[in-house]
Image: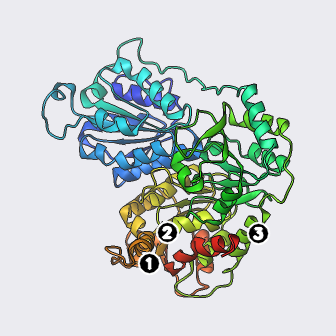
Amino acid sequence: MTSATDRPVTSGAQLLLRCLENEGVEYVFGIPGEENLDFVDALNESPIKLIVTRHEQGAAFMADIVGRLTGKPGVCFSTLGPGATNLVTGVADANMDHAPLIAIAGQAGIDRLHKESHQVLDLVRIFEPITRYASRIVTPSAIPETIRRAAKFAEAGKGGASFIELPEDVAAMPVESGYDVPLPVTSYGVSEPRESSLEQAAGLLSGARHPIILAGHGVVRAAASEALAELAERLNVPVANTFMAKGVIPFRHPMALGSVGLQSKDYVNVGFDQADVIVCIGYDLVEYHPQLWHPTRDRKIIHVDTEAAEVDAHYPVATSIVGDINTAMRRLGDLTTPHEGPAFRDLREALIEDMNRHADDDCLPVKPQKLIWDLRTALSSRDIVISDVGAHKMWLARMYRSERPNSCIISNGFASMGIALPGAIAAKLLYPERHIVAATGDAGFLMNVQELETAVRCNTPIIVLIWNDGGYGLIDMKQRRGFGRSTGVHFGNPDFVQLAESFGAKGYRVESGDGLLPILKDAMASNAVCVIDVPVDYRENEQLTRRLGEALVGG
């Protein structure tokens, strides 16, 4: 194959791919259709790898996870009409989770766009509310600028999704001389925080009696985990992380309190009840609404992020440090007097005790605590768990011990079911040497089960761990709590072992309380796509926050 720069560019589709190569794109995920045929054919001469999925939503979720794990845009594509609308959920998820993503949809020829026409929708208007940038390409000469702008909006600041509509006649058009070269990729420097803001924040923090740090996913995006751990240790201030920031401070760190984001009397929230100064670092309101952890609106909040704080009545910022997060934390550590006191160690000890409580449990169905204990025992700190959305997400957020950022991926901005299986495939493509586990409920698994074929075909040996309770367990819990009964939350399931085998994967079923760990080890050694069906006892859901919260507030 000729090098990227030596290949002639004779069409809009070829130029678009050349521009994506220039942005460092390695994979595109999607499904061929009539209106993207030139784009798909041009991939034959491109070093970019084509991953054909079985549904466009799966393609968008794969691109979503690529963006989240790498900080560079993941790319998904579709044809027009229903193909494009199938991308919407995954694109919205990436945008709200601030994962860099570029979605490209084929479109009918420009001569059809002014009138009612077969499968034609105004895709730019559809995607505008769920992206940071949406545009239609109307001439090949605009492609270099459009791709550069799409990548810029996807990566810059907090990041998010971009959308590009490519009419089929533009994709096939010859490229005008002088417009066949990608634009240079530029870096997006982050400004230095203002010294006056740092001094004001240091004054508040130095005078605090019970300070606490809330770390959000922005710390992961800024690769600032090391600086966070150093700040917490230097100032003797404990750190609670959002679901999306699991591992941003190693759980073994003495200042780590674990994840916040469960219920109002969650054990970590008891710490927020006691805190007088809360330092929110890289925190986005979509991760965990401040009304839940700051209902009184009377605490001093220090906002540290690359962008100014969102306006919210429960997020009254006393002082704001806007700029490079690494620099901000280092300077804050230099200027602040270290805190004296136990730093909420009773909260940390309570969490560790709860994590260890079911290590030797042998009940069937398996308790969620035991399931997580065995999963954590089997995996190394570098392996990756991609969580779907449901009751199991709450348990993973609480009980799974993460020592590294991006080792337990939880979508909690848009929080869409169905992300785990396609997301795990993307993670395995990026990190083939690591074990990748898709932790999913039986409901979320069946929403994109067709991507098992993609995993087998693409030789991405992932492990799909199904938490099987035959229903929407989290909704059942909330219905019973709110109404005293449940409605519409139970369903039937296929035989997951036979289903896995029909796709060419290996299927396992846990049939004893101590059976999961040996099955996990066998699956990890198999180098095959594996599906593990685990009957789970979600009667424990009611105990997820109640016992710890009540104990720590005196009953």
The image shows residue 130 at horizontal and vertical percentages of 39, 40
Residue 356 seen by the camera: yes
Q: Residue furthest left?
A: 116
Tell me if residue 288 comes above or below residue 164 in the rendering. Answer: below
User: Residue, x 51% and y 39% (percent of image)?
Assistant: 100
In the rendered structure, which amino acid carries the disc numbered 1? Answer: Asp
Whole-Å distance between the Cαs marked 2 and 1? 10 Å
Q: Which mark is residue 207?
A: none
Q: Which numbered disc, 2 or 3, marks the residue closer to the eye?
A: 3
Rendered-image quadrant of the C terminus: bottom right
- Depth check, front residue: 175 or 551: 551
Whole-Å distance between the Cαs marked 2 and 3? 24 Å
In the rendered structure, which amino acid carries the disc numbered 3? Answer: Glu
Q: Earlier in the sequence, mark 2 or mark 3?
A: 3
In the rendered structure, which amino acid carries the disc numbered 2? Answer: Ala
User: Residue, x 37% and y 46% (percent of image)?
Assistant: 30
| Label 1 crowd bin: few (<14), some (14–19), many (20+), radius 10 Å | many
User: Residue, x 54% and y 87% (percent of image)?
Assistant: 364
Q: Which residue is mark 3?
A: 349
Q: Which residue is mark 2?
A: 391
Q: Earlier in the sequence, mark 2 or mark 1?
A: 2
Hey, which quadrant is residue 517 in on the image? Answer: bottom right
Whole-Å distance between the Cαs marked 3 and 1? 31 Å
Q: Which residue is mark 1?
A: 469
Q: Earlier in the sequence, mark 3 or mark 1?
A: 3
The image shows residue 369 at horizontal and vertical percentages of 61, 76
Tell me if residue 309 comes above or below residue 424 in the rendering. Answer: above
Q: Secondary structure at mark 1?
A: loop
Residue 463 seen by the camera: no
Q: Which numbered disc, 2 or 1, marks the residue closer to the eye?
A: 2
